[in-house]
Image (cartoon, grey):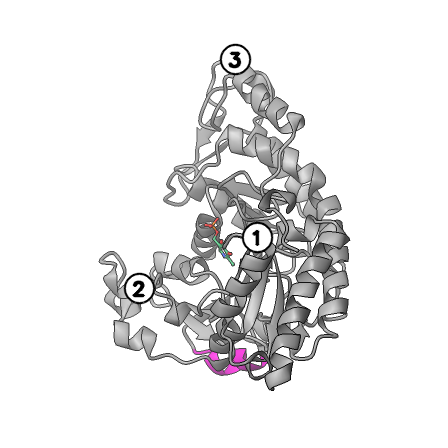
Amino acid sequence: MTIPFDQWPEWPQHSDRTRQKIEEVFQSNRWAISGYWTGEESMERKFAKAFADFNGVPYCVPTTSGSTALMLALEALGIGEGDEVIVPSLTWIATATAVLNVNALPVFVDVEEDTYCIDPQLIKSAITDKTKAIIPVHLFGSMANMDEISEIAQEHNLFVIEDCAQSHGSVWNGQRAGTIGDIGAFSCQQGKVLTAGEGGIIVTKNPRFFELIQQLRADSRVYCEDSSELMHGDMQLVKKGDIQGSNYCLSEFQSAILLDQLQELDDKNAIREKNAMFLNDALSKIDGIKVMKRPPQVSRQTYYGYVFRFDPVKFGGLNADQFCEILREKLNMGTFYLHPPYLPVHKNPLFCPWTKNRYLKSVRKTEAYWRGLHYPVSERASEQSIVIHHAILLAEPSHLSLLIDAVAELARKFCVTH
Ligand SMILES: Cc1ncc(COP(=O)(O)O)c(C=O)c1O
């Protein structure tokens, strides 16, 4: 049985409440934080407060994207020319390009086989006297081992920026993803569990970083201290100038959508988590399939993508692209919803720093340098695993059973010849 595409949950999702929130922006006539005071707090500031509360931290700054969130975090920490930053070799390219965008060198470290997050055991040997920070990425449906990473960072006096583009709401040892390191950076691009189409968010507990990040994202301006003294039509942003900024401000429309979407985040994450457990249970019983490990420190896991691994020997030598194609056809799912993991950054054709003139030569390097790197676990991941978009985890269990049946049928087919 195949299932019509429109019977799978789609992403993103909105309601009349979302439309109402956007309508409020039209009614206020303030479309940007650099617009004028209309007697009410900006949507951007309301969202920042709500997301800070959600994460249990004092400070939050929305930005234009997850990429700019990472870049501004690095800038606020003073990272730039001559510095090195450790990043996982398996991630979306933006983790590494953010480092290049401040003219520092991304130094790759391979990931763990069973979480696809940076392997803490391998971090130490990548540290040099130029290393300034580690960017662990909480990838797909796993969290990086923040206990070990924090310990290493402390020992070597390094900053930690958590890349939470894929992990809004996960909890490690009672702390939300993004609040364990010095700074957390989130993406709100269309595929993410909290989305406004595009957007980014930074959270921190450090008042100085907060002060700098605000300026970095609004041409060195900050919100004025006391808005009650403003007249309708006054600018709410005031000049500061401690650090050179640029414009990375989220619009009021995007902030309004995020305010709306945040209300449902924990509830939807809980449904995804329950269904991921259901899939884990069923798929792990199929010969040749392995599911990802969940460390005991994780009490809530957000799923940007649900991942399972397969043994190609038990599946007739199929690679991940072929495996996905069979499942997509059977389940009537598009490539947005079901695909192999990213190619590791050093092998990803989209990662080509040597083409960029504004990067320093010392970090731009050459095609031979980047393509010559080798990280075996990351390289295997893109060949032997499948990623299912989190929207599918919002489906009814009866629909999810079709997915399980499709994998089991494939396993049976190859089992005969194995
Ligand atoms: C792990 C990771 N880091 C960073 C980003 C960058 O976010 P954005 O696309 O909002 O710039 C993404 C987005 O896909 C991501 O998945």
Q: In this rendering, which labeled residue sits more in front, label 1 or label 3?
A: 1
Note whether 293 is above or below 230 in the view shown: below
Q: Earlier in the sequence, mark 3 or mark 2?
A: 3
Note whether 8 is above or below 226 in the view shown: below
Question: Residue 338: x percent and y percent?
Answer: 55, 58
What amino acid is found at the position of numbered circle 2 in the picture?
Cys
For the point 49% across and 71% down, the residue is: 382
Q: Quadrant of the C terminus?
A: bottom right
Question: Residue 410: x percent and y percent?
Answer: 62, 71
Q: Which residue is mark 3?
A: 232
Q: Which residue is mark 1?
A: 332
Question: Residue 60: x percent and y percent?
Answer: 59, 43
Q: Earlier in the sequence, mark 2 or mark 1?
A: 1
Q: What predominant SS class does the magenta segment belong to?
A: helix
Per the rendering, the mark at residue 352 is 2
The CA span between labels 1 and 3 is 53 Å
Q: Respond yes or no on whether mark 1 lies under 8 Å from ligand 1.
A: no
Secondary structure under tag 1 reads loop
